[in-house]
Image (cartoon, helix red, strand yellow):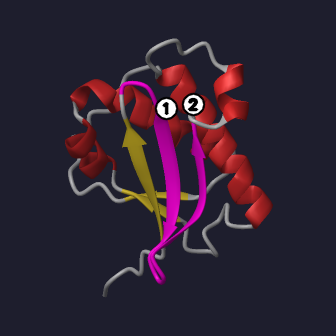
Amino acid sequence: MTVVKRYVLRLFISLKYITANVVDRNNGRIVTSASTIEHSIKGSLECGRSCNAKAASVVGEVLAKRLKVDGLDQGQGRGIHVNVNNELEKKGFKNRTKIWAIVNALKNNGVKLILDDNDENTSRPSY
């Protein structure tokens, strides 16, 4: 039995910016997003030339609030899927704290996330 992954979290991390998008896989459109490029988020951070895990956490919190406003914080009952291992492979090991900061901020703000990790050995940071 296959699980339909309608809503998927996609992360884009560079040295200067962090962007988190929730994509509707039925029609391929971005449902909501949050980024450190936005003036309202950038103004509240002290990133300088690079963004850190604190900035990633703020992006996660803003994304969670936007999902709640849109009524998608539960992913229409199915949750929002995120494959942390896949994101770590794409973004590199150095960005793992930023990835987990976004995921934890979403969870702490009441968003229903489904972690699609195939391995038991995830590189979760120890807080």
Residue 104 placed where, x, y %?
A: 53, 38
x 48%, y 23%: residue: 53
Direction bottom: furthest residue: 1
Residue 16 placed where, x, y %?
A: 43, 25
User: Is 123 left or right of 77, judged from the image as shown?
Assistant: left
Q: Which residue is mark 1?
A: 101
Tell me the crowding category of disc 2: few under 14, some 14 to 19, or many 20 or more residues within 10 angstroms, Cα based. many
x 38%, y 80%: residue: 3
x 34%, y 59%: residue: 116
Q: Which residue is mark 2?
A: 57
- Is the N terminus in the top left, top right, bottom left or bottom right quadrant? bottom left
- Whether the residues at callouts 1 and 2 have beta carbons within 8 Å, the answer is yes
The magenta span reads 15-35
Residue 118 image-quadrant placement: bottom left
Amino acid marked by disc 1: Ala
Q: Tag 1's secondary structure?
A: helix
User: Is 10 left or right of 55, judged from the image as shown?
Assistant: left
Residue 33 among those drawn in magenta: yes
x 39%, y 26%: residue: 97
Mark sitting earlier along the chain (1/2):
2
Residue 25 placed where, x, y %?
A: 44, 76
Residue 74 among those drawn in magenta: no
User: Is 82 left or right of 90, judged from the image as shown?
Assistant: right
